[in-house]
Amino acid sequence: MTKSVFLGTLAASALVAGFASAGTLDDVKARGELICGSNTGLTGFGAPDANGEWQGFDVALCRAVAAAVLGDATKVKFVPTTGETRFTALASGEVDLLVRNSTWTFSRDNDLKLDFVAVNYYDGQGFMVKKDLGVTSAKELDGATVCIQTGTTTELNLADFFKFNNITYTPVTVADDAEAQRQYLAGACDAFTTDASGLAASRATMPDPANHIILPEIISKEPLGPVVRHGDNNWGDIVRWTYYALLIAEEKGITQANVDEIAASSTDPEVRRLLGVEGETGAMMGVDNAWAHNAIKAVGNYGEIFAANIGESTPIGLARGLNELWSKGGLQYAPPVR
Amino acid sequence: MANTEASFVRTEMVAPQEPPLSERGVVKWVRENLFSGPLNTILTVLALVSLFYLVKLSLPWWLHGVWKANSLGECRQIIADAYGPDATGACWAMIRERWHQFIFGFYPPEMYWRPILSFGLLFVALAPALFFGDRRNNLVILAGVALFLLLSLWALDNDLLHIALIMMMMAGFVALVLIAPRKLLWFTLIYPALAQFLLWGGSVWGPVLTMLGLAVLAVVYVVLQPRFGVVMASAMGFVAACVWWLALQSSVSTALYTLMPIGLEALDSDQFGGFLLAFVIGVSSISAALPIGILLALGRRSDMLLIKTLSVTIIEFVRGVPLITMLFTASLLLQYFLPPRTNFDLILRVVILVTVFSAAYIAEVIRGGLAALPRGQFEAADALGLDYWQAQRLITMPQALKISIPGIVTTFIGLFKDTTLVTFVGLAEPLRGITSIVRADIDWKGIYWEPYIFVGAIFFLCCFSISRYSMYLEHKLKTDHR
Amino acid sequence: MAYVADAPKASFRPSMLIYDTRYRSITIQVIVLLLAVLFVGWLADNTIQNLAAKDKDINFSFLWNRAGYDLDQQLIPYTNDSTHGRAAMVGLLNTLAVAFLGCIFSTILGVFIGVLRLSKNWLVSRLMTVYIEMFRNVPLLLWIIMVFVIFSEIAPAPKDFKVTDEMIAAGELPKASMMFMDSVAVTNRGTNIPMPLVEHPLGYVNLGFATANLTVVALFALIGASIYANRRVARHARAVQEATGDRPTIWWKSLLILFAPSIFFLWALGFHLEYPELKGFNFKGGLNVAHSFTALLLALVLYYGAVIAETVRSGIIAISNGQSEAAFALGLRPGRTMRLVILPQALRVIIPPLISQFLSLTKDTSLGIGVSYLDLRGTLGGITLNQTGRELECMLLMMLIYLLISLLISFVMNIYNHSVKLKER
């Protein structure tokens, strides 16, 4: 009976919008919409709110790219991806860009044929335990039960860590962040391990944050960043430089509120180049010259995004730490716009 | 003559004596039904004890339910204030704030009338199939749909003009049923296109022209059938329709749209979620699976070795793997099998794979129906000189389908429940998809009983009523007199 | 003179391929074959093109690479140094374990509920109706998740079992205690049950792809031999009965043959149970069963118990009243009526749907994904797929294995069905 719905939609969506041309940029422009692979729901980083509007730290980067490419931060569609489907969704062209707490690793870069274009959050894997357990170091966790999310780099790191330190553990594998937190709180595991940012976010939203401690050991490097398909360098550059533009904006004190004013009045040549007042920065990448201006206007600079979604004033309350600008002792460093 | 009244003959009956206490009323009922023997007594006591503990454990939680709060913390605070620090209670405030996401997903609130109208019209479209042109039942169902639409649209603050328009349309259906109940079948035929238009929006010409493609198929079939036979004619009709759909339709549709821009605001599939998604996947898969299932069932019973082998392979393969692997195929593998850089909507991919899945199950149900027919029916059809397709259409299929309807409904219930599995490929179905989205909100982090109970209750209502309907149908269709 | 039998020897004309029913079926088959071959070729061609575009190949060698992740339940030895293939094997065994136990327990529960549903006790039959309808009409996934949540929220933590000296001095009892004479501990992180162990194991033998535990193999062989010997004894007894009319008493022989060898074997090897004990964070020793397993199994049993109960009920109802009346008329007692008259007939009605329910149950073990149970889908189709990025290989292999399991189950059950089927002309 609904065969025709099927055929109609097939005809409409598959064959009209489906056949993509060579470059992702052209696809996005032709479609008039950016498709961004996101989390299925991770507090602070990417989740839809009560109105179905996606919000979060990673989401803001997608919106910035949409603003840079299409001039409109609302023209972005979020496709929730799970740990299993995320890289396939990107590789198959289902999404143009994946911003979903994905760790940059050697094998993902080389074996999965993906390009990590930047690191928007420097993270590391840590452990959280209940205070009354009396544990102060991860090395004392011999024989403990540990909750881990499957399908991530964390389970490999965990196996390596315990093996290296010659201690044993029982893994409790969990599908998503909310479930891991529930099990940890219910006492189904002694320790909960994930990226330190996730631990802090979890702890902040617990009824009794003071009763939980995050152990000092950070057992891995987890550079999280936006991912694009291997081989589409132009598109990779656009995503990378949109991200850098947000960093430079913070460095130069350009905010969502004052970007128009600065564009009109600034005499700093780098700011003028960045905001498209002089030079042809946009044209070199194949986008509008006001790309960075649009991006900053849409979502604010890196510091603003951080503060609004996961910063210390939010319930998640993460400190900048490694993600502070290089000039303030962090690792976030953008090459010059020249 | 007064003395003929013999004093020893009573003129009125003695009032019957009350039966003994143990043989009447509640006592008798209890004795017979609950304590008729030692085993039964033990069972009753066990049942009562377990019931008591169940109620004792959960009743406070239900009674302490909070409906007005803005976060889980606030809920707990209210309960702690009212009933003491150790009291537990349900936090229904979450449902109150997020119910629309459980039902409609991310569908824009001002357009809720579209899914509601499609849902109501679904029953109008199903009415001819559900009740076989029985006028009274059709009227009852129409009245029910009208009432449902009126109440829900009014509750969602739609303006009176639109409600009045929709009510006029319903009045039209009532008139149609009164005049010619069989004609409602035409509405069933156009319903798929209508529902697609209502749900996804966009230009009205897309669905209209898609239906036109079906008309092309029908015309080609009618013209060619006498000359080339059923299979050839329908194959050619299908080819012609495909040519229309793939080559001509989009340009004609665009042209018409520029001439007459009639349409609704277009919506993307990613805005579908919750029970809306479950219904879209369930209903479209099962209805698309029905014709495919019939063909597969016929193929499995065919004399042609190749066709039989092919059908058996497809059916057994699909029935041999779990639905979840089919869904992962839709999300991970389908793009390997399609031409490079083809890509379409995840919902559509899921619907295609679920259709294939349910087609195999329906094929088995219909095969059961065909097998149940007495051999005489087939032989009678042959004796009348009917060819294969005439025999199928006029003799066997009507009977086989009639027997299979309860099985098909059961398959539908199973499929509807299985739509919850689409969460594992990242779609926002109500049970786990929407629930995890709600729990990602800081306000509702840590809530877990309430969403499951809410979603479970709605699933129960749907599935239970469908299965009751199936039982009614089974009873009604049982025309053999045993 | 021409007879009708001498039909005109019609020469073959091409149009007969369409109009002549004798040839039309060949035409249709050829066309369908062509279309099918074209379709498969088209898929294969697309796949090759897509793989080339992504710079990938189809290669199963990853199965021999180090997996690097740990699993929380393994029936065969596995560490993170084992291969992906081994991990898949662990997953497969986990799937089979749940499926096997699920089929057994849900049949037991289903028969029990189905009979109670027909009980004359009003309260009990109503309760069973509520149970059946409640479980059948709500998605299985919901039950799996619910049972899991109940386990991890309501069960006590391991530290609640701790008995300290102060508590003994104060005469307090610990918050939770073990069940079944201190042998089973249900905590919020798993169920600890005693583990059967032998003191002098027979060792292992390496078969290349897997290692076989000789103790288990020997035990199974012994049980098989006992059952066979018992059959022989029973057959002999029947032969004597046929010949003389007296059946020799054999029950003690049967018992001896069935159980004595196994018990002696276990005793000789030093069989004992290792009980779980609270040490450090957790219970140590014994067998720790993860809640993901328990929840999945329990939910499957409850759900399919309800489904099977309906099958059993309809099977019993389908046997006409006349059968039991006839049995009573022959003087059979109710128990015998059920066992000798009703059940053998009801079984014929029950078994075909039961087969398909076993198949569905086996396939539905894949829903363990909802509670992260590491079955075949969790290892091969989950972590391995995700860590290696070989979705095509993993998915195809996984589908193939599921298909084989299903075919095997339906094969075995069909043989059984055939053996109990009413033999007609």
Image: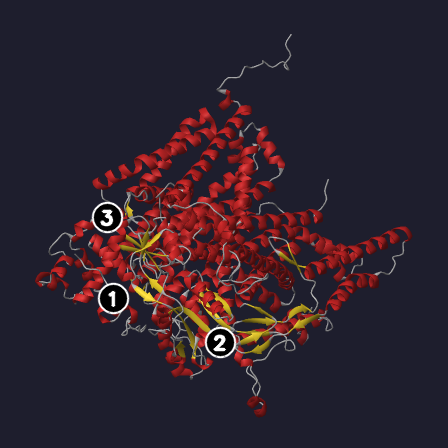
Q: Quadrant of the C terminus of chain A?
A: bottom left
Considering only vertical position in the picture, is B374 above or below B32?
Answer: above
For residue B152, above or below residue C47: below
Quote the CA–CA distance across marks 1 and 3: 25 Å
Whole-percent x, y for residue A316 in the image: 32, 72
Question: On the same chain: label 1 and label 3?
Answer: yes
Say which amino acid is labelled 3. Lys
Q: Secondary structure at mark 3?
A: helix
Residue B59's tag is: 2
**For mark 2, does the 10 Å Cα neighbourhood hold few (<14), some (14 to 19), or many (20 or more) residues?**
few
Any part of residue C138 in sight: no
Q: Distance of mark 3 from mark 2, alpha carbons?
A: 58 Å
Kindly identify which chain the residue marked by label 3 belongs to. Answer: A
Mark drawn on residue A305:
1
Q: Which mark is residue B300?
A: none
Please rate how many residues cluster around mark 1, counting C-alpha atoms within 10 Å: few if below 14, some from 14 to 19, many from 20.
many
Residue B147 image position (x, y, % from top left): 37, 57
